[in-house]
Image (cartoon, rainbow, N blue to C red):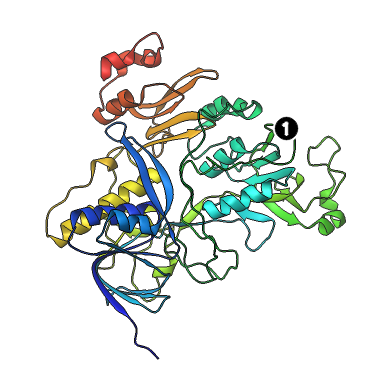
């Protein structure tokens, strides 16, 4: 048997998602004379493009899927190894690769992302949307669909139900309102009418280059973000979708309707039926007025915990992700958080020497700022990857480093239902209990503004629409100015608050 090929590098990064690529780019810039190794199992990586610092903490950027060769061309000292990780041996500072190579490191950063939490495994009628390839599969199946059922209430579900046209959508959420992860019931009520109206025309055609892959990863190997998959023949290939994943992908079914979304609240999946089982089941009997009553057979039926059963062409599982830490635990002594993430300190270090982690795979276990919380979002993946690289460099050079300012205030900017959405601080009063007050203003079809106040100090905010208040509110939260004297006038639209507090 041939000897294993051994490679040595000062810095090794596992995972071709945003955290991993950002970490690699930062290391390559700081150490231009050292080779930086990025391990990824697929030919596509995630790259941040069109980055813009909107304010002190708010960022705006695009996420683009690119061949890994583009990263090597941009940074000549980056070496991308396209292979899955078989095993990490942290004590020996080496990784065993599926291609037979051994990779030795001085400093390692694990950026293996998260894995989709499908509510059921190995069902051909249940589709999880994770990467561009699974999004393409969704597009293909949707093109022949009359009705789909979407399970979930996170970002992917919110974007999907709004974007789908020409197909009836049954949306099952376990909460009392849509978008519970991102905003409250008031914001949900502001957005709901958008589901019953035609979407506006796009301002311009989407011109960004798209890349696809032409192979599947065998069971037991890892995807673009370096994760080792379960023994499941339907393997997701790439890292998580970008915030504009639906751009340039036609999401249309066979019906003439533009927008048709029916929401079922406070329910989850109870059972999935084949057509044969459905006909035999006594539970399938529904009142004739129920929208789930059908005269013809559907490929699959889903029974919800509220007692309703719907036939559909297929089911979309958009129920979030879990940290993909499992592949690295065997034989090592990682401290793991309750959510399965690798515990990291304020230098992004895990409990294993010289092993760091960033992005969805890690759980921040330092004492956080009163205005910051971890949410597994694109902005935090980029920030953590960038900061992890700086910490790796500082530790190697024995230089001091302070926690980056981006961890002072939670700040996230995105778009839902074609509205700009900005979330700041404790935007949903996270951790405040009953010790807070809410101020709100709403202009139907235009804007929704909510601020979270505690003892006269602003703790968080939700801004939907073109409010132009994000920088002002960011300053008010960071400065913790006493606003008691303003009372409800703080959101009075006739008062130009920016002039007072910018």
Count of marks, rendered view: 1
296 or 329: which is nearer to us? 296
Density class for disc 1 (Cα within 10 Å; few <14, some 14-19, many ≥20) is few
**Who's the residue at 30% across and 19% down the image?**
483
**Who's the residue at 51% across and 19% down the image?**
446
The quarter holding residue 201 reads top right
Q: Secondary structure at mark 1?
A: loop
Q: Is residue 457 visible?
A: no
Q: Is residue 368 left or right of residue 85?
A: left
Q: Is residue 122 visible?
A: yes
**Who's the residue at 77% across and 53% down the image?**
299
The quarter holding residue 77 reads bottom left
- Residue 196, given in percent of the width and then of the height, sits at 66, 27
Which quarter shows the C terminus? top left
- Residue 17, given in percent of the width and then of the height, sits at 40, 55
- Residue 270, given in percent of the width and then of the height, sits at 69, 52
**Who's the residue at 62% across and 62% down the image?**
121
Which quarter shows the N terminus? bottom left
Residue indicated by mark 1: 257
Q: Is residue 248 left or right of residue 342?
A: right
- Residue 144, given in percent of the width and then of the height, sits at 73, 47
418 or 65: which is nearer to us? 65
* Residue 392 in the image: above or below residue 310: below
Question: Residue extending furthest bottom?
Answer: 1
Q: Is residue 210 left or right of residue 124?
A: left
């Amino acid at each position: 048997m041939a000897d294993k090929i051994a490679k040595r590098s000062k810095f090794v990064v596992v995972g071709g998602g945003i955290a991993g690529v950002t970490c690699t780019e930062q290391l390559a810039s700081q150490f231009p004379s050292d080779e930086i190794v990025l391990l990824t199992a697929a030919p596509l990586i995630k790259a941040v493009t069109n980055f813009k610092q909107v304010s002190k903490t708010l960022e705006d950027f695009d996420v683009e899927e690119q061949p890994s060769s583009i990263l090597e061309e941009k940074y000549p000292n980056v070496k991308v190894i396209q292979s899955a990780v078989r095993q990490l041996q942290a004590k020996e500072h080496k990784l065993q690769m599926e291609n037979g190579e051994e990779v030795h490191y001085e400093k390692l950063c694990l950026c293996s992302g998260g894995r989709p939490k499908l509510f059921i495994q190995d069902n051909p009628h249940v589709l999880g949307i994770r990467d561009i390839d699974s999004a393409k599969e969704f597009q293909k199946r949707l093109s022949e669909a009359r009705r789909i059922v979407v399970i979930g209430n996170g970002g992917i579900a919110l974007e999907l139900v709004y974007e789908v046209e020409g197909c009836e959508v049954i949306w099952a959420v376990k909460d009392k309102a849509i978008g519970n992860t991102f905003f409250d019931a008031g914001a949900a009520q502001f957005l709901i009418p958008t589901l019953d109206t035609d979407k506006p025309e796009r301002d311009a055609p989407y011109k960004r280059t798209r890349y696809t892959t032409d192979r599947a990863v065998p069971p037991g190997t890892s995807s673009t973000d370096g994760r080792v998959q379960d023994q499941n023949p339907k393997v997701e290939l790439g890292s998580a979708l970008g915030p504009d994943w639906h751009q340039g992908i036609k999401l249309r079914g066979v019906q003439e309707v533009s927008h048709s979304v029916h929401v079922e609240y406070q329910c989850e999946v109870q059972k999935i039926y084949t057509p044969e089982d459905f006909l035999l089941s006594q539970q399938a009997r529904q009142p004739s007025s129920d929208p789930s009553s059908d005269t013809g057979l559907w490929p699959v039926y889903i029974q919800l915990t509220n007692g309703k059963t719907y036939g559909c062409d297929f089911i979309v599982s958009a129920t979030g992700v879990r940290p993909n830490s499992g592949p690295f635990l065997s034989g090592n002594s990682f401290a793991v958080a309750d959510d399965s993430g690798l515990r990291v300190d304020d230098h992004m270090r895990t409990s294993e020497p010289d092993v760091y982690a960033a992005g969805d795979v890690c759980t921040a276990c330092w004492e956080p700022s009163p205005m910051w919380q971890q949410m597994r979002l694109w902005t935090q993946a980029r920030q953590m990857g960038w900061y992890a690289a700086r910490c790796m460099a500082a530790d190697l050079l024995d230089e001091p480093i302070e926690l980056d300012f981006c961890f002072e205030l939670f700040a996230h900017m995105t778009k839902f239902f074609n509205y700009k959405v900005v979330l700041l601080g404790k935007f949903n009063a996270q951790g405040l209990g009953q010790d807070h007050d809410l101020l709100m203003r709403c202009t139907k079809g235009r804007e929704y503004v909510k601020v979270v106040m505690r003892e006269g100090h602003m703790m968080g905010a939700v801004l939907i629409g073109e409010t132009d208040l994000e920088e002002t509110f960011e300053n008010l939260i960071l400065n913790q100015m006493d606003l008691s004297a303003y009372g409800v006038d703080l959101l009075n639209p006739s008062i130009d608050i920016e002039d007072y507090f910018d």
